[in-house]
Each structure stands twice: as C-alpha cells, then as structure tokens.
Amino acid sequence: MKRLAVTTIVFALAAFAADISGAWKATAEGPNGSMERTFVFKVDGTKVTGETTSTMMGKSTINDGKIDGDTVTFTITGSFGGNEVKLNYKGKVSGNEIHFTSEMAGGGGGQAIEWTARKVR
C-alpha cells in the first residue's frame, strides 16, 4: 500500500511540471549588446532534452535537463572563440515565458546573463 501511495505522489508531482515542449526564442543583453538564442525542448516526465542555437555559439545539445514544477535546469556545451564552454541554465516558467539565468560552469569568473524566452507559436 505504501508503494502505491508513493507512486501516486510521484506521478502527481510530474503532472504539475510545466510543459515547455517545443520551440522558444530567447533574448538577453550581454556585455557586447543584444543576444538571441532558440531552444527546442523535448520533455519526458521530468527529463528535459533538445537543442539550442545561437549566432555566437552555434548549435548545442541540451544535457542534464530537468523540470521540477516551474523550475527548469540544464547545461549546454558550445564553442566560443575556439574554446569549449559549458554553460549552466536555470529558469522559472511563467505561462508562455521562461526567465533564465546562464552562467559558465565552475564559476569561470564570468557574470550571469539574464534571458527571457517566449514560446514560438
């Protein structure tokens, strides 16, 4: 009986996770001006996968993605100036918007970048 209750709770919590599946277009102000990035998310329960594209870093795969309620986290690895760069993303979903913060993995000395993503219709 306990096992059934735990399973029911797990499925109920997954049902409350925000649905971010599909394409999103994000913008941010960086140290060198305005930036754009597209995300294509695929969600399976609480697991988030997909890809993202920007003019600065090209195409990257979404790794270690997770959605918990209205919070989404993932990492991407891309090439910037010939160097491989890993970025950590954390965001809050609010309707058809996600407000992300991205930071270099391991601290890297860089500043966080604030992104606003909107669902592409």
Image (cartoon, rainbow, N blue to C red):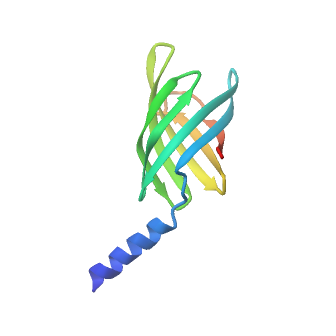
Q: How many marks?
A: 0
Q: Which residue lies at the image location 46% right of the left edge and 43% below the top edge?
A: 74
Specify the quadrant of the image occupied by residue 30. top right
- Residue 69 % position (x, y): 52, 62
Q: Which residue lies at the image location 41% right of the left edge and 59% below the top edge?
A: 45
Q: Is residue 57 left or right of residue 49?
A: right
Q: Is residue 63 left or right of residue 114?
A: left
Please name whichever residue, 76 or 42, is drawn nearer the observer in this view of the structure.
Answer: 42
Pick out the residue farthest to the front.
Answer: 121
Pick out the residue farthest to the top.
Answer: 82
Q: Is residue 62 left or right of residue 36?
A: left
Q: Quadrant of the N terminus?
A: bottom left
Specify the quadrant of the image occupied by residue 76. top left
Specify the quadrant of the image occupied by residue 56. top right
- Residue 79 % position (x, y): 47, 20
- Residue 33 % position (x, y): 72, 23
- Residue 19 % position (x, y): 54, 57
Please name whichever residue, 34 or 31, is drawn nearer the observer in this view of the structure.
Answer: 34
Residue 10 to residue 97: above or below: below
Q: Which residue lies at the image location 51% right of the left edge and 62% below the top edge?
A: 17
